[in-house]
Amino acid sequence: MTDFPYASDIAAGDVREAHNVLAGEPGIGPGLTCRWPSDRAPAGFVLFCHGLGSNGREYADLARHWARHGYLVIQPTFADAVGRVARDESELGLDPDADLSGWTQVPAVRARMHEILHAPEHWLERIATATCVMDRLDKVLEATAGRPERRLPGAVAGHSFGAYTAQLLAGAEIDLPGSPARRFRDGRIGAAMLLSAQGRDQQGLRDGSWDAMDGPVLTVTGTLDRGAKGGDWRWKSEPYDLAPAGSKYLAVLEDGDHYLGGFSDNGIQRQVPGQREAVKQITLAFLDAHLRGSPAARDWLAAIDDRVGDCPLLFKRK
């Protein structure tokens, strides 16, 4: 049992943030949202990939938590953000400048977004955008936290469709229609955090997809987190189960749904403070352990059993 909270050896500080960073750069889209510590140089960076229909300004509470403890968090807005889809596809009848957080309740929009989710060109668009961001990391640093004296270690993280993107950047292999199996591993990324990820038989994933995903990976799901095809949390845990051993972790939150305690207080996501806090602590400990090499963070992850604070869970490591 881990009743004691994770306490990073980097004390929490203030956060700075900027929007529309590198807007207008080829391949970047409308620009990046970046959050970073205001009182110190970043210890590393996290490239965060949002879920289907979301955007780079969301997931602010989690991103600020990482930034407060020493990380530059970089959040692109992909072409499947519902605001971008509304702007590009006027026939949907959506105002791209309105609050579109309830798009899942509009059948025509939900159907179109489902098509996007399963369209290989959109899988590849996300990889292309993420690669463009990585290629311009020096420019991102110059526009935000400043150029570091050394190369920053980096992680990729994502939720839902963003977790799919993160898997690919971490080395998962997929089948694409009419082409050989493809891998998109980016060597500039040293660790991955998958929040409500995907298992086999969706978006090109299948047996063997995770054989080469040999770096540190944290997979987080919940017992109420179900896949698009009805699979339960065990399907969501396959990126852990089917990856080779070595710095792999799985957290399954009891009664946790797709939003893992709530990433946004938008009236749609169920808010469970104990789950939300557990996700913050586990992800920060993972970053500290595998980007900064913190022995205390590794020890804390090794001590987790069936609870983090007020959140009961199943925790595995291999």
Image (cartoon, rainbow, N blue to C red):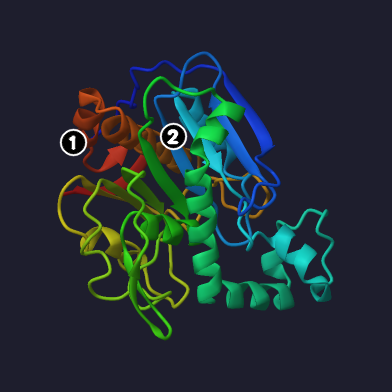
Q: Identify residue for label 2.
A: 45
168 and 239: which is toward the camera: 168
Residue 239 % position (x, y): 29, 61
Q: Residue furthest bottom?
A: 178
Pick the front one: 292 or 52: 292
Quarter location, residue 183: bottom left
Q: Secondary structure at mark 1?
A: helix
Q: Which mark is residue 302?
A: 1
Q: Position of residue 259 (x, y in %)?
A: 51, 53
- Say which amino acid is labelled 2: Phe
| Alpha-carbon span between mark 1 and mark 2 | 24 Å
The secondary element bearing badge 2 is classed as strand
Q: Is residue 310 visible?
A: no
Quarter assignment of residue 178: bottom left
Write the residue at 84% across / 61% down.
95
Q: Residue at x 31, y 58 (%)?
A: 171
Q: Which sits earlier in the primary sequence, circle 1 or circle 2?
A: 2
Q: Residues within 10 Å of mark 1 (few under 14, many from 20)?
A: some
Quarter of the figure that contains the N terminus: top left
Q: Nearer the viewer, residue 146 or 7?
A: 146
Q: Amino acid at mark 1?
A: Ala
- Nearer the observer, 130 or 103: 130
Q: Is residue 247 left or right of residue 114?
A: left
The reply to whether callout 1 and callout 2 are in contact (CB within 8 Å) is: no
